[in-house]
Image (spheres, rainbow, N blue to C red):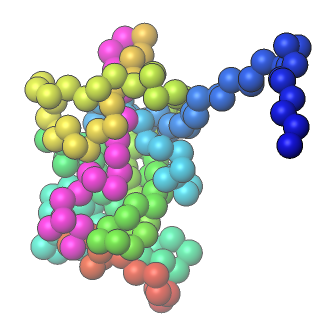
Amino acid sequence: MTFTRPSLSAPAPVPVKASTQSMLRCQIGKGQYLIPLTKVLEIIRYVTPTPVPQTPPWVNGVMNLRGRVIPVIDLAVKFSEPPSAPDEWTCIVLVEVELQGELTTLGLVTTLVSEIHDLQASDLEPPPTVGTQIRVEFLQGLFKLEQGFALALDLDRVLSSNEQVSIRGLSSEGQVS
């Protein structure tokens, strides 16, 4: 058996590039929020959803998107703000979230979609423990902007298990006439 001594001129190890996460920044109500780009399926112009009786106030209704029934949610209302007032900048961001162990498409009403940020884990501050109108378990962290912060959402945790049951019943992978 022969052992060789490593050469002193061996190349230096290549540093591992820190992983980045691309996040879509949008305005929901009065706040700036970040949505993981891996969850975003599509951004469409606002269409008025069809109201569904006996749903929570933050559920605007459902929309027909290429034969699929998509629940449309106004997170501003869920986060204790007034309902979004649609204008020419209002969009629906279609996202795929895990509800009760199944992937479900939801439409999120946003008053403005602004840009994409490529973030390192170190770019996010820990979520605040007080002073927000939303539960901190919804948040991945805070991203410092020139003025204020954008809250990075964990979309799989925004809805409680009871809320997930009511939303899951609204979505349909089947065809709409």
In the shown orientation, is residue 47 left or right of residue 17? left
Q: Is residue 18 above or below residue 58?
A: above
The part of the image, by quadrant, that contains residue 58 is bottom left
Decide whether residue 159 is among the magenta residues: yes
Q: Which residues are magenta?
A: 147-165
In the shown orientation, is residue 44 left or right of residue 32? right
- Residue sitting at the far top: 146
The part of the image, by quadrant, that contains residue 11 is top right
The quadrant of the image that shows the N terminus is: top right
Decide whether residue 25 is among the magenta residues: no
Q: Is residue 107 above or below residue 119?
A: below
Image point (29%, 71%), residue name: 100
Image point (78%, 18%), residue name: 12
Q: Position of residue 59 (x, y in %)?
A: 24, 61
- The residue nearer to you, when weighing 33 against 27, is 33
Image point (66%, 29%), residue name: 16
Q: Position of residue 163 (x, y in %)?
A: 18, 65
